[in-house]
Amino acid sequence: MKTRCFAGLLLALAAALTACSPSSTGVDEDLSQPTMPSSDMADHEMAEPMDMADHETPDHGGHEHGQPVDLTGLASRPEVSLLAEADGSGGIMLDIEVLGLELVPADPPVDHRPGQGHVHVAVDGLPVAMIADTSYHVAGLTNGSHAVTVTLSSNDHRDYHAGGSAISATADVQVTGGAPLVEPDVRFEVDVAGGTIGGGLQRFEASVGQLVEVTVRSDVADDVHLHVYDLKVAVHERMPAVLLVEVDIPGVFEAELHTAGFKIFELAVS
Amino acid sequence: MMLPAVLAHGVGGRSDLPVPEWQAAWGATVALVLSFAALGLLWHRPRLRDMSVGIPVTPAVAGIVRSIMGVLRAAVLIVFLVVLAAGLVGADDALSNISPVSVYVLFWIGIPVASILLGPVWRAVSPWETLGRLVSRPSDGEAPGWLTSGWAALVPISIFHWLELAYHDGANPRVLGWLGLAYTLGLMAVSRRWGWEEARRAEGFGVLFDAVASLSPFRRDGSGRLFVRPPLVGVAGSSASPVLLAVILAALGGTAFDGFSRTRVWGGLMVGRAGWEATAVSTVGLVWIVALVGLAYHLACRSGGRLTGDPDFAARFGASLVPILVGYDLAHYFSLLLLEGQTFIALASDPLGRGWDLFGTVDNAVNWTLVSTTAVGWVQLGSIVIGHMVAVVVAHDRAVEEWRPTIALRSQYPMLVVMVAYTVLALLLITG
């Protein structure tokens, strides 16, 4: 990964080269840091691997950068579908189904050949991998909603298009158990099982202005509702609810399981 | 599914922060020291009864007050009808229907606060008073005992407390709507049959609010003349009937339970309980606390009766519980009135939850930081301690009115014990 440093110096150049599509250094591994929510950050991250690729390996194959491979005219076009599920520890498991395309690893580089290709995986619009497998694991994500997109790509990394748009599939996944979006000042946890709260009913204390994160686990599906701050987050046995709130109203606030109808913690803000 | 906890429980979204223990301890100390000082240092001849009479206002002022009350009476009647309609046919959702906040905050807390400040306002503006007089007919026979005895007043008060504090779906607009309608029709039927003067005895809220209004600097005599007097002394002149005593103790116990139910002890007990199971447990808790509060007063009065040989001891000092009740109420509900009460502004524009915006206020957001938690803490402490002091002074005055100083002093030992017990309980509840 020494090339990353080199590429980092050329960020300015990268801006001029954004029209270039990624080249062939892509391997079946994560290319990026854990995804960040801010969009300008995403732009930089996106630019980095492309830039690196273009300078590491001379442009090959003579294809026109950014020009997709249009398959609209084909009688049977390739198809892709995606099943994505949070793994509960900051990652997403992808189950990809590809029809009508032979998956060929892009490393070492191969030239474009009709009927062959691989899958580009992007999270929140940011490329994370190029793969020739039908399952993939994205790790190290922040908590919250992430959009995962898989796109069919030619051997030379051009998107396959049909009907004017890329052949792709997208899934929105609520990631939990990963890094918080931003580092909270205080963290609390609540475990609800069998109608009881582990450790009993707690009153969590925080100061005005703090960023508070409360993780609620429950053995039954429900919504966690924190009054006045009006947060409502879904929870089920495999997915804890993460309530993240900057507390700016002093007082004592109750959180309850919406359907079960009982209080599960209190938040005292002073 | 509603959010029952939001509204049913004293409508509390934001509870007050616990008052620091040192602050409460100071409050308790002040209350204790002043109480015992009162035994020896206060006057030996009754003073408050004369002060509680006050002076009549000039006819001009009385006229202005009368016209203002006329306007208010009409306004309250309209609000009442809107709230009733909202309960019956409005959105079936506690948060987008105007009825829960109107019933539990504006009516149940707002009217007592207005009564303390302005006197017997409920008597002047109550829609039941307005409608009851309208349908009233002279009695065509002797009213039955359950009505003339006044015990019927305990029914609406008890049901209301249960609905607010124990029933799991107490903020359900339909429940409020139908019960409100049933109560209104019941009162009207009684008024039609035996006349409003009799029916009023069954209007428990009026009975309670009238008692609270006795603390105000305004009063009306039997003929409706308006008097001005020093605040807080008004309870001095009145005995509490057994009915009024029961109503006051029920309200006191209810408020204490509301405080208790916000402690973690109670919260822990309610974990995993919902629906009718929660209702059942809360009902037991509510009845238990009301019984405890009542029993404390009963024991004090029995002992006081023995010390003084006075069979009417409980009634004689019953009115001195009113300031304690008001202290409890302000301590528990002051912030609720100022904060949750704001939701009325938005809901007034869309009372039925139909997406209207009648007054352009539908987007009015609640300012949850309108009062600082420090200010709330001091109001809580102040109202409890001041309520306690007024109660002690009033009871003292009643005692020296009835007995010579030595017996009067003796009569106050059990009264002080029970009042200090109530006050310490109140202080404990606001530190929880």
Image (cartoon, rainbow, N blue to C red):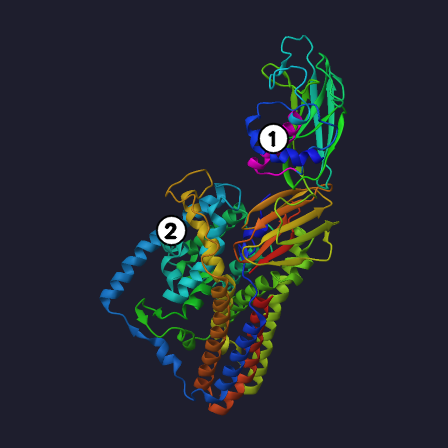
Side (left or right) of B240 relative to A72: left
SS for tag 2?
helix
Please report, as a chain letter, where disc 1 is located.
A
Q: Using the image as rendered, state which of residue B68 and residue A71 is in the foreground.
A: A71
Residue at the spot x=61%, y=66% of the render? B289
Instruction: Specify the amino acid type for callout 1.
Output: Ala
Rendered location of residue A186, percent (x, y): 63, 54
Q: Split into 4 quadrants, where in the image is the C terminus of chain B?
A: bottom right
Please report, as a chain letter, where disc 2 is located.
B
Q: Does the magenta stretch include residue A50?
A: yes
In the rendering, which numbered label is found on residue A187?
none
Q: Which stretch appears magenta? A: A35-54
Rendered location of residue A147, percent (x, y): 63, 32
Residue at the spot x=55%, y=65% of the render? B250
Rendered location of residue A180, percent (x, y): 65, 45
Q: Using the image as rendered, state which of residue B144 and residue B340 is in the foreground.
A: B340
Q: Using the image as rendered, state which of residue B128 and residue A71 is in the foreground.
A: A71
User: Mark 2 highlights which residue?
Assistant: B77
